[in-house]
Image (spheres, rainbow, N blue to C red):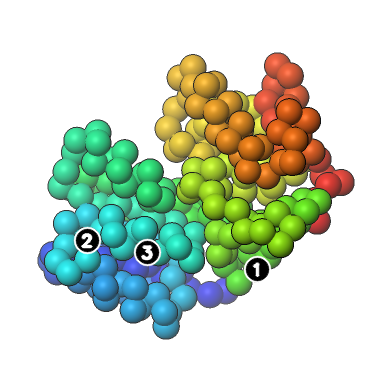
Amino acid sequence: MAETTILMVDDEAEIIRLMEIYFKNEGYRLLQAGDGVEALELLQTNRVDLIVLDVMMPRMDGLQACMRIRENNHIPIIMLSAKSQDIDKISGLSIGADDYVTKPFSPLELIARIKSQLRRFNHFSGGSQANANEIQIEDVAINIASHRVTVGEEEIKLTPREFALLKMLAVNRGVVLSMDRIYEEVWNEPFMDSKNSVMVHIRKLREKLEKNPQQPRIIKTVWGVGYKVEADHAK
């Protein structure tokens, strides 16, 4: 079984040294970078399972690095920042981060967040990036590893949240997913009367994937329950 590799990107070396002890105790391999430029270089030559990415760094900050990483990769990303304003958290999550931890943080909390994101990613991708094969649903092809979706020969641009929603439905094809389960998995926060958020994202997905969004072939509504992708439409 391949060793789990964590890339920690932070210009505060003492934080990385501290976390190295905890990573070692969990059996994780640590790669470290001091800024976004160095992180992107490491990703070119190393297999990485999860990235812990600080926001405030020289040369290329965490938000810029996150956007660059998301162009070609859907590795779980946990943003790390001294900023605690809601707008900073929203900015990180909206450009593709999967979670957000505010400094100062408990190393044990960060380890718990890492484990949670790894479990979620492994569930969606079948256990490894190398085996994250393309899912085909009629004329829609979803590549989990490259974060790429095509309809026929045309590549469709999805936001990170739209992709996460489509991926969840595709991986769980044949299963009716309730709105609260979808919201808690995709938004990574408790469901509190957030039906409109799910419905709006489903509508946007249908507009991008369907020739006739009013009569969807891919994402079916199960009235009073939630949504699903038919098992016999996927392979």
**Alpha carbons under labels 3 and 1: distance apart:** 23 Å
Determine which quarter of the picture holds residue 130.
bottom right
Residue 68, label in figure: 3
Residue 61, label in figure: 2
Query: Which SS class for mark 2?
Result: loop
Residue found 19% across the figure and 35% down from its top: 85
User: Does residue 67 appear to the left or right of 208 in the view shown?
Assistant: left
1 or 2: mark nearer the eye: 2
Q: Which comes sooner in the sequence, label 2 or label 3?
A: 2
Q: Position of residue 37 (x, y in %)?
A: 26, 73
Determine which quarter of the picture holds residue 31.
bottom left
In the image, farthest residue toward the right: 232
Residue highlighted by disc 1: 131
Q: Residues within 10 Å of mark 2 (few under 14, many from 20)?
A: some
Residue found 48% across the figure and 48% down from its top: 160
Q: Which comes sooner in the sequence, label 3 or label 1?
A: 3
Of 118 and 150, the residue lying toward us: 150
Q: How many numbered marks does the figure carry?
A: 3
Of 79 and 62, the residue lying toward us: 62
